Image (cartoon, rainbow, N blue to C red):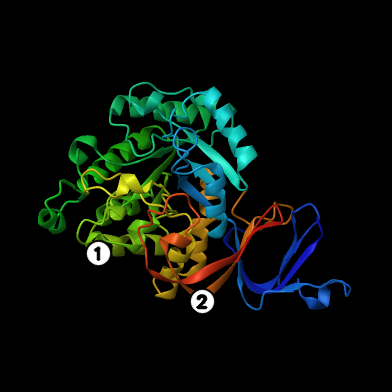
Amino acid sequence: MKKQYFINANIIDPQNSINENGGLIVSEEGKIEAIGKKVNTNNLPSRERPIDLKGKYIFPGLVDMRVFVGEPGYEYKENFRTLSNAALSGGVTSVVTMPNTNPVIDNVSIVDFLKRRGRDKSKINIFPCASLTQNLEGSNMTEFGLLANKGIVAFTDGVKTIQNTRLMSRIMNSAKDLGCLIMQHAEDYELAKNGMINSGIIATKLGLSSIPEVAERIIIERDLTLLEKVKCRYHISQLSSGKSVEIIKERKNDIKFTCGVSINNLSLNENDIGDFKTFLKLSPPLRKEEDRLMLVQGLKDKTIDVIVSDHKPEDEESKRLTFSQAATGASGIETLLSLSLELFHNGSVKLETIIQALTSNPAKILNINKGNLSIGNDADFCIVDINKPWIVKKENLISKSKNTSIEDKKLQGKVTNTFVKGKELFKI
């Protein structure tokens, strides 16, 4: 690979506290050789022709902590190849894949298969999760030690919650002993049973069974109480309510844990569901505008650590049904960054805070050396025209499934190039 020189870029790398105009040098081995304002035409070899980015932004490759990939079992919804291409178009270079496949990722043989497939078919960095319990049944723990030794970065039951308090206590104790990361989907099963959207006027108007915000709060309170005694690595996958943000803010001073939020809950509310838009049937559900604003404030003041896409592609047949029958989830990895930038353009959150929640924060939580532009690291980064307008059209999406929650939405900010290990793998 030939050495590459980029100049006149606005570089933001939260991990290294870089927020300046400068350049980037990528070595022949695909590593970051130099970065920052010292990289300019005055300091480059005269024979080289640097690429002038004319004020475009360079961000570290995004780390998406919550992505569903259809392999194995649901390849007709998404596979490693289509996921990679979709991720690259959105500036995402590392993903954490969920274990709710068929078969479930709950034993070492399935992990071996998954890693081989990822290595052979994927262009991006794949970090698989395994399930907390066997077959996602919430009864018997998986073999944390064996699975962690195979390269599993975290454990979660996906869209299911550990309901049994005694089992959750055992899980936390094992996680503490082995240094494993637990990612909990916080939702009390009995309160959320058969629910489809947020509890309130919209649910009553549409005649749909609902999920109250207290279903989320009860699990968060329980787990944080357990965490006071058993200090393991614990992460709440997706907050959806303002009350949850208040609890997190109160408890973060006393207990060490992290939390995330889906870009859907940061950008949309229950009113967007309109007349039964099944592409907005999500888990956790969209809640009130007041909840959305409190989530945005939680991100702004860094109560919330991470933004995820919650990318869950579904085939058209699973979504073109009545609301009660339609599958839950939306495709979102391609629009994650652009939709997040909406919070910057409307003055809600600082740009550096947004990029931190998409890059260095998830990488630190996962204990992986990604999401930064440190010298000597793999050159995983994206180039972004932060003001470029575009419209989300399902026919232009690269993901195998087109169930976007924001079809026809006008966005500002587009990834123009994405590099993994110094290789340009996406360009518009």
Check disc 2 and report the residue beneath it.
Answer: 387
Check disc 1 and report the residue beneath it.
Answer: 289
- For label 1, the crowd category at 10 Å Cα-Cα, with few meaning under 14, some 14 to 19 and many 20 or more, is some
Please name which of the two marks, 1 or 2, marks the residue nearer to the observer: 2
- For label 2, the crowd category at 10 Å Cα-Cα, with few meaning under 14, some 14 to 19 and many 20 or more, is some
Whether residue 301 is visible: no
Q: Position of residue 153 (x, y in %)?
A: 53, 37
83 with respect to 8 (left or right) = left
Q: Quadrant of the C terminus?
A: bottom right
Q: CA distance from mark 1 to mark 2?
A: 26 Å
Amino acid at circle 1: Glu
Q: In which image quadrant can residue 151 be found?
A: top right
Sequence order check, earlier mark of 1 and 2: 1
Element type where label 1 sits in the image: helix
Q: Position of residue 87 (x, y in %)?
A: 53, 53
Q: Position of residue 89 (x, y in %)?
A: 55, 59
Depth check: 9 or 361 in front? 9
Q: Quadrant of the N terminus?
A: bottom right
26 with respect to 420 (left or right) = right
Element type where label 2 sits in the image: strand
Whether residue 161 is visible: yes
Q: Position of residue 260 (x, y in %)?
A: 41, 51
